[in-house]
Image (cartoon, grey):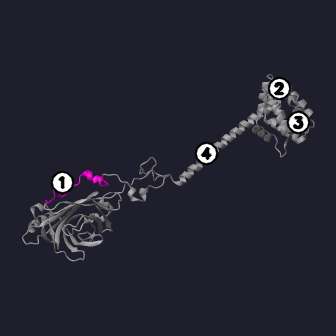
């Protein structure tokens, strides 16, 4: 059940690899939704059409009754308006309209409209990136771009946004401001909301806004906007078409698809949180290491066993060949009689002490046609020939080793005496075996009688 979430050759989250980052960190989970309503229920609650009412206060919370906007003195307490909040997957289109009535009765009034766009973030935590947006009062005022900000869900009923701007339109001209905005549902379906906005310059509050929002239908929104244009005697140049003709009121300033993508809209851009290549679990690495070590040991053991086997074969060939060179081989079994074996033993044991020393054995091996034997092979041969703790080889050990060299001796015998048949060679080596057993149990007594019997048997075989 390999999860193909990793971007490289090694996939994370399977039996051999560590869990994918996406299992613990939603930012790396390619399957997690980028849509607003899937990340936080509060976004879905706040979508729709609303009737708004704003109240502006100075820094010391004194009501701002009037303000000067575009050379007009307008009423600002309260300021009625509307909001259209639309969610489309990863994108939000938010349009706000605030009516400022002329303080002079019968004078022309203004509408401040704001197009704000948001998209979800790569964090996948419900936060929204508020893109730079445009606010305008009418053709009498220039459109000013507000820098981007971030909005966060707080629980299931509130939003918190922070940002900064060049000024608070119509209420503050002191320059660069930062602001904090909250929107809170006052009931479960969020049909009624409370809104607060605090604006600061150099850490001092300059303007505060307290407002309410009440949900209305689309028809009520359209009818209310068009009726308020008439009731407030709004400049024609300050009016925007309702219903809207595009995704923003400032048609020439609507975001293009390219701008959405360049700003980091997850629906058309690549997240920086990409699942890295899978990492093999430490236990698996250790397991493979141990398994590899075991296999290596097995291979080394087999190689060693093979080399020991070949070395023992070389030693048997060398020893048997040397013995075959010194024996006077006949067609009779007497060729390998106990006396003949003893004679060969004594050829090696030049001191006739009844035991062969290492030096004597090496001298014997290297004195014939076989040539020199290397130290390692000789030590192995010596270890095989003498079975006790002594540093010499006795006659019994000599005969026992000769019995092990049956095949090698037969080969050497055939090479030295072409007339020797395979059957005769096998008979001689059988004698060697029986001699070794006989010597071990009964010594050399009555072996001459056995020689005569073996000779007769050999003659019948021949």
Can you say which quadrant of the picture contains the C terminus?
A: top right
Q: Position of residue 322 (x, y in %)?
A: 81, 30
Between 6 and 395, the one nearer to me in the picture:
6
Quadrant in the picture for residue 299: top right
Q: What residue does disc 4 label?
A: 295
Q: What kind of secondary structure does the magenta stretch mostly adopt?
A: loop
Mark 3 to mark 1 CA distance (whole Å):
117 Å
Magenta residues, as a range? 240-267
Mark 2 to mark 4 CA distance (whole Å):
52 Å
Quick one: label 4, few (<14), some, or many (20+) residues within 10 Å? few
> What is the secondary structure assignment of the residue under circle 2?
helix
Quick one: label 3, few (<14), some, or many (20+) residues within 10 Å? many
Q: Say which residue appears at 43% left-offset and 59% top-offset.
A: 24
Q: What residue does disc 2 label?
A: 461
Q: What residue does disc 1 label?
A: 252
Mark 4 to mark 3 CA distance (whole Å):
47 Å
> What is the secondary structure assignment of the residue under circle 1?
helix
Q: What residue does disc 3 label?
A: 349
Quick one: label 2, few (<14), some, or many (20+) residues within 10 Å? few
Mark 2 to mark 3 CA distance (whole Å):
33 Å
Q: Is residue 420 above or below residue 14?
A: above
The mark lying in front, picked from 4 and 3, is 3
> What is the secondary structure assignment of the residue under circle 3?
loop
Between 363 and 281, the one nearer to me in the picture:
363
């Amino acid at each position: 059940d390999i999860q193909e979430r990793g971007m490289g050759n090694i996939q994370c989250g399977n039996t051999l690899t560590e869990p994918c980052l996406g299992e613990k960190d939603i930012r790396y989970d390619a399957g997690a939704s980028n849509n607003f309503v899937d990340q936080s229920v509060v976004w879905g609650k706040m979508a729709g059409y609303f009737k708004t009412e704003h109240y502006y206060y100075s820094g010391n919370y004194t009501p701002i009754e009037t303000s000067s906007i575009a050379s007009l003195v307008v009423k600002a307490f309260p300021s009625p308006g509307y909001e259209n909040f639309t969610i489309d997957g990863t994108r939000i289109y938010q349009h706000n309209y605030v009516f400022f009535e002329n303080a002079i009765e019968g004078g022309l009034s203004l509408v401040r409209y704001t197009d704000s766009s948001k998209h979800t973030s790569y964090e996948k935590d419900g936060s929204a990136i508020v893109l730079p947006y445009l606010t305008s009062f009418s053709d009498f005022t220039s459109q000013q771009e507000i820098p981007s900000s971030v909005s966060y869900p707080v629980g299931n009923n509130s939003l918190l946004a922070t940002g900064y701007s060049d000024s608070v339109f119509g209420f503050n001209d002191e320059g660069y401001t930062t602001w904090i905005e909250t929107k809170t549902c006052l009931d479960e379906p969020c049909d009624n909301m409370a809104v607060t906005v605090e604006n600061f310059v150099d850490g001092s509050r300059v303007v505060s806004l307290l407002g309410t929002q009440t949900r209305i239908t689309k028809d009520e929104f359209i009818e209310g906007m068009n009726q308020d244009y008439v009731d407030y005697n709004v400049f024609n140049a300050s009016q925007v078409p309702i219903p809207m003709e595009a995704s923003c009121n400032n048609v020439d300033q609507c975001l293009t698809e390219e701008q959405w993508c360049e700003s980091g809209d997850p629906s058309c851009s690549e997240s920086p949180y990409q699942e890295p290549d899978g990492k093999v679990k430490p236990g698996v690495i250790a397991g493979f290491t141990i398994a590899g070590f075991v296999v290596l040991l097995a291979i080394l053991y087999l190689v060693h066993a093979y080399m020991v086997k070949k070395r023992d074969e070389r030693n048997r060939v060398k020893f048997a060949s040397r013995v075959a060179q010194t024996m006077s081989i006949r067609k009779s079994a007497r060729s390998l009689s106990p006396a003949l074996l003893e004679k060969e033993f004594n050829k090696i044991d030049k001191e006739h002490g009844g035991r062969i020393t290492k030096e004597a054995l090496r001298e014997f091996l290297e004195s014939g046609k076989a040539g020199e034997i290397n130290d390692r092979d000789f030590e192995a041969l010596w270890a095989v020939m003498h079975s006790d703790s002594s540093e010499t080889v006795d006659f019994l050990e000599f005969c026992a080793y000769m019995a092990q060299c049956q095949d090698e001796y037969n080969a050497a015998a055939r090479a030295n005496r072409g007339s020797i048949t395979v059957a005769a060679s096998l008979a001689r080596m059988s004698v060697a075996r029986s001699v070794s057993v006989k010597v071990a149990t009964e010594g050399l007594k009555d072996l001459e009688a056995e020689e005569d019997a073996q000779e007769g048997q050999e003659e019948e075989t021949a």
